């Protein structure tokens, strides 16, 4: 039996199917990774043989075997030792193979560990004209970007995040703004117990539905500090072609690392960027907490400010209220950083509204009090509009205002639209003539 020992322990180390879409640089890195790991596994087998005395002339201690007399000439002690060792090595090799495959997948998905690939160079002239901004949620969630949404506890950041998620999954407008319907992945690492009742409240309030494929939640934590975990999430996002990914919260998905550490948060925002780059058309929102003594300052390292494209804060309108109470009725949403420069003024007057027939509430804006009738008319036109049609155009708005009897003719309606645009209450896209809500205009 010793003559065939090397064959007995030969193990197929090639059990990794290469992706068929690798470019030359990625294939080279993957081949090098496989060669390193295969060499390491062979060395492991040799070491295991030596440690278990399989290549030594000294026989192992005899083992009592009852069936020894039934098969003359069979070395049962050696058989038992060999089998025990084979099982141990097989388990160890499988563990190493899983680890190796995770590392190789990470290399492939993340651009081969940041390896510079000259094949991906693009000349300035080849870039062509600048493309218009492509928003999943008009003016707020742009494709290919990341957002940190933060607030103090019990203020409503998860309500806003779920509202965004459901609006995108259903293709329903949000606060009068057009939404592109798309796939959503919500990582509910925090607040899993409250997710279902809040979802039921949203569906009952809005009346919109979505397919199982378009709205998915992962009710567990994901360690964004672990390369294998990040690689797994990135691979799934790319495979699923999700449009919006929400991670709730940073604290629950940072593997217990120090939020005040520049190094730790640098790794975190780098992981977020890697997931986003795995499928570039998506937008990622990460929920985070504010400082206890400053509701407009996020908690942790300044690396977070530099690492996210957009930074959005939710806070109470009124100060001096019980910080653990929802009794303070109004909330405002403030965009502190926006990668495309200027953004709307803060959105105000969001209030928690109980939904009949459910056990939870929704956070919606009471926009109608004191708002210009033209703005309200535009909001009503947008609410049930198919996102695929695009925003309401200026011509459509003035015709609708005239048909509704709000103005005697289209010229008067168009003049009022122009006044509201100059005030910032309405915004007109010069390319498409689409009209969206800007700063909410007051009467007069």
Image: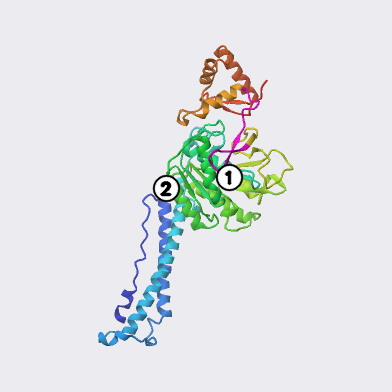
Ranked by sequence position, the earlier of labels 2 and 1 is: 1
Q: In which quarter of the image is the C terminus?
A: top right
The magenta stretch spans which residues? Answer: 351-372
* Marker count (numbered): 2
Q: Is residue 326 visible?
A: yes
User: What colour scheme governs how the chains and residues are painted in the rendered image of this protein?
Assistant: rainbow
Q: In this view, does 409 lie to the left or right of 83?
A: right
In depth, the one of 303 and 259 nearer the eye is: 259
Q: Where is residue 387 in the image (x, y as percent from the top left)?
A: 47, 31
At mark 1, the secondary structure is helix
The relative height of residue 375 versus residue 329 in the rendered view (above or below) is above
Residue named by callout 2: 239
Q: Where is residue 317 in the image (x, y as percent from the top left)?
A: 69, 38
Is residue 118 highlighted in magenta?
no
Is residue 362 highlighted in magenta?
yes
Q: Where is residue 416 in the image (x, y as percent from the top left)?
A: 61, 18
Residue named by callout 1: 158
Q: How far apart are marks 2 and 1 (CA)?
A: 26 Å
| Residue mark closest to the camera, 2 vs 1 | 1
């Amino acid at each position: 039996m010793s003559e065939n020992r090397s064959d007995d322990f030969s193990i197929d180390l090639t059990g990794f199917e290469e992706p068929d879409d690798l470019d030359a640089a990625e294939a080279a890195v993957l081949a090098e990774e496989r060669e390193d790991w295969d060499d390491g596994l062979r060395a492991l087998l040799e070491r295991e043989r030596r440690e278990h005395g399989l290549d030594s002339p000294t026989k192992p201690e005899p083992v009592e075997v009852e069936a020894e007399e039934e098969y003359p000439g069979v070395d049962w002690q050696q058989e038992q030792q060999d089998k025990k060792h084979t099982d141990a090595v097989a388990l160890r090799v499988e563990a190493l193979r899983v680890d190796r495959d995770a590392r190789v997948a990470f290399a492939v998905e993340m651009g081969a560990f940041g390896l510079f690939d000259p094949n991906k160079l693009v000349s300035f002239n080849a870039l062509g004209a600048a493309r218009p901004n492509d928003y999943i949620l008009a003016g707020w969630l742009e494709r290919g970007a990341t957002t940190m949404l933060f607030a103090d506890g019990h203020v409503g950041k998860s309500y806003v995040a779920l509202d965004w998620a459901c609006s995108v999954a259903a293709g329903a407008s949000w606060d009068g703004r057009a939404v592109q319907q798309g796939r959503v992945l919500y990582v509910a690492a925090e607040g899993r117990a409250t997710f279902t009742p809040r979802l039921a409240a949203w569906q009952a309030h809005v009346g919109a539905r979505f397919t199982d494929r378009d709205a998915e939640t992962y009710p567990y934590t994901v360690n964004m500090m672990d390369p294998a975990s990040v690689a797994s999430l990135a691979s799934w996002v790319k495979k699923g072609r999700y449009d919006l990914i929400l991670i709730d919260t940073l604290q629950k998905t940072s593997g217990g690392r120090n939020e005040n550490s520049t190094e730790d948060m640098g790794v975190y925002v780098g992981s977020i960027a890697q997931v986003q780059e795995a499928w570039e058309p998506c937008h990622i929102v990460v929920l985070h907490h504010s400082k206890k003594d400053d509701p407009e300052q996020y908690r942790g390292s300044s690396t977070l400010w530099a690492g996210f494209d957009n930074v959005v804060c939710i806070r109470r309108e009124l100060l001096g209220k019980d910080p653990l109470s929802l009794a303070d009725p109004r909330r405002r949403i403030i965009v502190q950083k926006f990668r495309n420069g200027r953004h709307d003024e803060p959105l105000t007057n969001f209030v928690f509204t109980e939904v009949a027939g459910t056990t939870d509430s929704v956070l919606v804006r009471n926009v109608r009090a004191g708002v210009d009738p033209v703005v309200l008319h535009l909001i009503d036109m947008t609410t049930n509009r198919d996102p695929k049609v695009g925003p309401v155009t200026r011509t459509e708005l003035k015709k609708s205002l005239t048909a509704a009897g709000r103005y005697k003719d289209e010229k008067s309606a168009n003049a009022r639209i122009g006044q509201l645009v100059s005030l910032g209450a309405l915004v007109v896209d010069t390319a498409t003539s689409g009209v969206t809500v800007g700063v909410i205009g007051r009467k007069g």
